[in-house]
Image: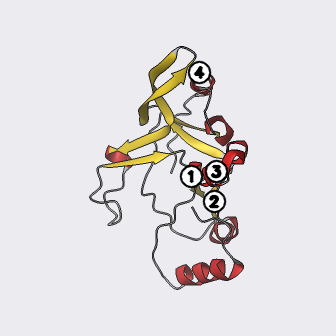
Amino acid sequence: HPDKLSAKTLYALDQYFLKGGHGVIFLDPLSEVGAAAYGPAGDAMISSSDLKQLLDAWGIEMEPGKIVADGKFARRINAGTATGTKPIDYPGWISITGDAINTDDSVTAKLETINMATAGSLRKRDGAALDMVPLLRSSDQAALMPAQQFQGMPDFATLLRDFKPTGQRYV
C-alpha cells in the first residue's frame, strides 16, 4: 500500500522502470489495513494508494474509488445481520482461479489461487505506448462498485442488491 511517497521516490521508480526494470506494483483503492491505521476515523475515510503521477506518465489508469466486485470469485463469509450471522458470498473479497490467472508470466505461472480483498482495476489508456500484460482478471460476472459500499461494516443487503455484473472482465 504505497502511501504518500516522496517526489524523489516516485522519480526513482519511474527511472527504474524506464530503464527496463521489472516489478510488480500493488495499488489499493480501499486499503482496509490503511484505514484501520487511522484509528476510529479510519471507518469514515477512504484510504487508498494510486500512484496517480506515475500511472498518468505511463498511460495506465486505476478507476479511483472503485472496487472490483465479482460474483463468480466471491469469497464466502459470515455476515452479521440483525438476527446473528449468515453465510453470504461477498463479492468484494475474491478468490481468483483458473484462466483468470496468467500462467504464461513467471510471476503468476505456478499460482492456483489468489485471494484479494477490495481490489481495484487497472487499464491501459487509449494511445498509451506501453505493453500491458494482465496477470489477474476478474470473471465476466464482475462490476466496478463504489469503495464506500465496502468500507467498515458494509450493509450486505444493499451491497448485494446493488451488485449488477457488467459482463466485462477487469484487470
Q: CA distance from mark 3 to mark 2?
A: 11 Å
Q: Report crowding for label 1: few under 14, some 14 to 19, many 20 or more residues within 10 A (C-alpha).
A: few
Where disc 4 sits, the SS reads: helix
Q: CA distance from mark 4 to mark 3?
A: 23 Å
| Disc assigned to residue 33 | 1
Cβ–Cβ under 8 Å for marks 4 and 3 = no
Residue that protrudes farthest toward the top in the picture: 83
Cβ–Cβ under 8 Å for marks 4 and 1 = no
Q: CA distance from mark 2 to mark 4?
A: 28 Å
Q: CA distance from mark 4 to mark 1?
A: 24 Å
Q: Report crowding for label 3: few under 14, some 14 to 19, many 20 or more residues within 10 A (C-alpha).
A: many
Cβ–Cβ under 8 Å for marks 1 and 3 = yes
Q: Amino acid at mark 2?
A: Ser
In the image: residue 31, left or right of residue 139 = right
Q: Amino acid at mark 3?
A: Ala
Q: Report crowding for label 4: few under 14, some 14 to 19, many 20 or more residues within 10 A (C-alpha).
A: few
Q: Which residue is mark 4?
A: 157
Q: Earlier in the sequence, mark 2 or mark 4?
A: 2
Q: Amino acid at mark 1?
A: Val
